[in-house]
Amino acid sequence: MTGIRSINLKLQTKTALYFVLGLLGVILSSLFIVRYFFLVSLDSLEITELNTASQQASSVLNMMIREQEEHSYDWAYWDETHNLLIGGDVEAYRERNLMMESLDALKLDLMIFINLHDDVVDHLARDSDDYPNLVPHVINHPSVSDHINSMNQVLDAYRDSISGLIKVDEQIWSISVTPVRNSEGVSASSGWLIWGQHISARFPGDYASILIAKNELVPLSVLETGTEIVSNKMLKTSNTIVNWNQLKGLSGEPIVALRSEIERVHYAKGNLLFLYLLASVIFTTTIIAVATFLLFRKKVATRFSDLERDIDDLFTSYQLEGKFAGNQDEFERLTHMVQILADNTSITQDRLNDTLQKFDALYHNRSIAMVLVRNREIIDVNQMALGMLDYRKDQILHQPIDILCPDQGQPECQVDMMYREFNKGKKHFEACVLTRSGEHVDCQIETTLIKHEGEDALMLSIHDLREKRQQQQLIEDLSERDYLSSLSNRRAILEKVDHAITETANEFSFIYVTMPRLKMVSEVFGHQIFDAAIKYIASVFHGCFSQYSIGRISVNEFVVLVPNKSEYDEAVICAQKLIDELSSKKPILGVELDLSCQAVIVDPEITHEPLDYLLQAAIYAVQSNQTPARVGVVGSEMSEKAKTSSVICRELGASIREEQICAYYQPIVEAKTGEVNGFEALARWLHPTLGMISPAVFIPLTEQNNLEIELGESIILQTCRFIEQLNRQRKGSNHRPLTVHVNLSATHFYHSQLSAYLASAIAKYNVQPGQLVIEITESMLMGAEEEVISRMEEIKALGVQIALDDFGTGYSSFSTLCSFPFDIVKLDKSYIDQIENNDRAKTLVRNIAKMSQELGLTTVAEGVETASQARKIRNWNIEEIQGFHFYKPLPREEAMSIICE
């Protein structure tokens, strides 16, 4: 504005000119802002359109690949193709099916047929002269060969197809690899069918007419370094917009770039339209601005002429003409004059007001109590001090400061010490102040020397520390307490136990308590009842262990620290009292809850061991406690068992997978001749360091660790391998094949993949019908009868016999043998043990055998251990016998040697 001021325009003219310039600025800036957002919107629409086009092109490619893979199953699951790969007539197949017309009809450019030995049985390729090495390149492509090799290594049921893009000689091909089976799809795969489309030649092809953008496939390897290609990069010019999208091949790595291009028609039209609009607005705005200037200057700005004359008169009267630059307008001159007059009169008043306001705000602060003392006499207090000290103002004014001292009867009270220390230069003190009601308040006092009515006085700023210390205590409690039970939390109680291990090893003990059913309370009855139950349990703990530290370490686990081994016997009594107190159901908010618990106490002789080890031993002791209504003791023997259990759990999965847990085979003999009729496969674990581990130990652990299905599948696979070796040897010596029994758990019996796994194992080892027997127990029949029968029929359809194991020990009756399709009944050892001295047991076994024979079932007596038992069983016409009287479970090699002998 310096150039305008130099012309020295009148206020009237300048006002009108400023108004017009402001109007022009608003219009033009608004116009350009609108243009910017308009073009940005068009640009966004074009980008959206291009992204849609690129996605459309990618979808077309994916559709071509997917349809190729789906259609390949029509040829792969065809008896003619299946027979070709297992040794059929190649020439006849070629003459009937492998013609260029077949490729045309299937929209293909390549067919390859490969058997399971990776041999190319036949192939057909379009333009084979142009691509002489096409077939080897496709077969040897890493993604194709890796898939075929990996699928050939798995069970036939898991062999699957694959499809995707590969690059051959800088050309892009769509390849599908499909396993070949018979028309029903139930046979084992005989090889692989590879179909291919020359995507570089076929895309976009016929799809160009339906695609929005102009699309092109460019192999990444032919692009030069430093080109515009970046994965999913959008490139714009004034006329076109291009999107590069990298596509991945079978290997998962990018092999080709999809280039999609559209013309920027909307952007160009919008830009041109705005140029026309800009020209018309500029022309119209110019006319409006001139008219507005003239009108405003005539109708409105004339009033400023009167203001200008009045300002000149004012400056003349105060003789201020020479104090301002000549180019300042009237408003600037008037402003400066008012400022000069006001500054000189307000500076002192402002400073005084500032000081008074600061002091007043400090004195009446609601968080700081202030007491003014002169010559040990209280002469003023603020409201905060009155509230903290519990006085009215008239009760405390002009009283000696000593009334606030809690130790007035002493030779020297805290007030005396405060004055003495203040005279030494100390200004901050911590003291205890006495309120009117006699309460002691911990405070922090800051002293300041001031003048009051010309005399020295002390301003005491008193900070109440009660809330701060309460908060500190609360924080400490929250960091160490379980908020719900008010017991020590996991970190706090375990730190105490760990500290005791470090400082007083073998001189202390602790009690571990668990409540198995407590976890269900929240799930079944809700959080409100669960919270009330925890509080009730905490009260019982406090009643039983009032002198000990108690902590809650999980939802349903508690630890009680017994600091001295001299209190060991008393702690056991307290723990038994806790068990007895919680043994019966308790009414909690109107609901009867089972809060029974189990408790064990750790013997002080092992409390030098690490904390984790002791807790693991305590948990194991609870699980192993045969009398849960009594307090268990965790001694050195139990701790060693816990250590062993931990090792077993840690190595269980690997031992199953590596077949360290293997099948031992107990022979089953014919009752009349004593000849071996078959075997029962039993899981045994010979650990490299722990020796032979009992199934009674590791079988429950497999259930706890969800490994029972994996163990069952391993034993089935080992058994089928044994059957194949056993019966191959017997066939060579012209002996009849033998059967082998395998036990199934309930979880495995109802597993959805059981039948498929059995079929796979049977096929892998060529197990013939009737050679494999699955044993199930009566308890596994307790589900829906229709579902159980359906599962049994499904297994029997594979050529597998089913035996009812441990008959008579479950909940079933004799109707079980009539209702379910069993082939074999195995009498439980508990019956056999009694047949020598219990007439009712003899009668029951005879009748079971007779009934089974009438139903066409084979009967097996388990657990035969004496010659007398064997003799009676032969007389009752029981067909087969199993037990230690004849053979114990044997390793595979010993079982094979028995058959050889």
Image: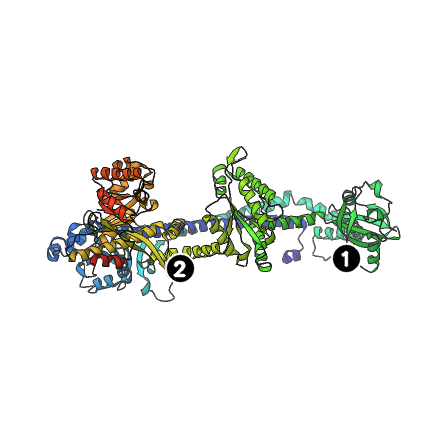
* Residue projecting furthest to the top: 590
- Amino acid under disc 2: Leu
Query: Label 2 belongs to which residue?
Result: 690
Q: Is residue 519 left or right of residue 859?
A: right
Residue 738 in the image: state x and y as whole percent: 21, 51
Q: Tag count in the figure? A: 2
Residue 43 in the image: state x and y as whole percent: 42, 51
Residue at 81% from the left image edge and 60% from the top image edge: 425
Q: Considering the numbered disc 1 on the image, is that residue within a helix, a strand or a loop?
A: helix
Residue 469 in the image: state x and y as whole percent: 69, 50
For residue 322, the mark is: 1
Residue 539 in the image: state x and y as whole percent: 59, 41
Residue 782 visible: yes
Q: Is residue 815 left or right of residue 687?
A: left
- Amino acid under disc 1: Gly
In three-dimensional space, the C-alpha distance between marks 1 and 2, rounded to whole angstroms, equals 112 Å
Q: Considering the numbered disc 2 on the image, is that residue within a helix, a strand or a loop?
A: loop
Q: Is residue 577 above or below residue 732?
A: above
For residue 436, the mark is: none
Graded by Cα atoms within 10 Å as few (under 14), some (14 to 19) or many (20 or more), the crowding at tag 2 reads few
